[in-house]
Image (tube, helix red, strand yellow):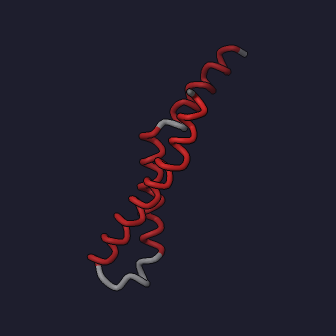
């Protein structure tokens, strides 16, 4: 039972790591851009939308969830 709990803790640490979350935000921004590619009429607009979407999601994560989580740990 202890071995399973240790492995579960390791998986949880990886799942909530900042690198993994930013990678997820990157993938979700890419998927969101691809789903809206028919509405975005040029490649330049699609790239701009992708970076805008990623930066918006990353800022929301950083300012809302990451700071709130760090305040709780203190």
Disc tally is 0
Work out which residue is located at the far left of the displayed protein and give it.
Answer: 44
Depicted 2 relative to depicted 59: above or below: above
Depicted 69 relative to depicted 48: above or below: above
In front of the other: 67 or 38 = 67
In this rendering, position of residue 72 left or right of residue 31: right
In front of the other: 71 or 36 = 71
At which x and y percent is residue 8? 63, 27
Question: Can you say which quadrant of the picture contains the C terminus?
Answer: top right
- For the point 47% across and 68% down, the residue is 32
At which x and y percent is residue 41? 34, 85
- For the point 45% across and 39% down, the residue is 18
- For the point 46% across and 47% down, the residue is 62
Work out which residue is located at the far top of the displayed protein and give it.
Answer: 2
Quarter occupied by residue 45:
bottom left
At which x and y percent is residue 47? 31, 70
At which x and y percent is residue 29? 44, 62
- For the point 43% across and 61% down, the residue is 56
In front of the other: 64 or 49 = 64
In this rendering, position of residue 61 left or right of residue 19: right
Depicted 36 relative to depicted 55: above or below: below
Question: Can you say which quadrant of the picture contains the N terminus?
Answer: top right
């Amino acid at each position: 039972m202890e071995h399973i709990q240790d492995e579960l803790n390791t998986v949880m640490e990886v799942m909530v790591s900042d690198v993994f979350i930013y990678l997820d935000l990157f993938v979700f921004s890419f998927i969101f851009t691809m789903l809206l590619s028919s509405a975005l009429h040029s490649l330049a607009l699609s790239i701009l939308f992708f970076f805008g979407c990623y930066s918006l999601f990353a800022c929301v994560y950083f300012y809302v969830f990451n700071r709130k989580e760090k305040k709780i740990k203190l």
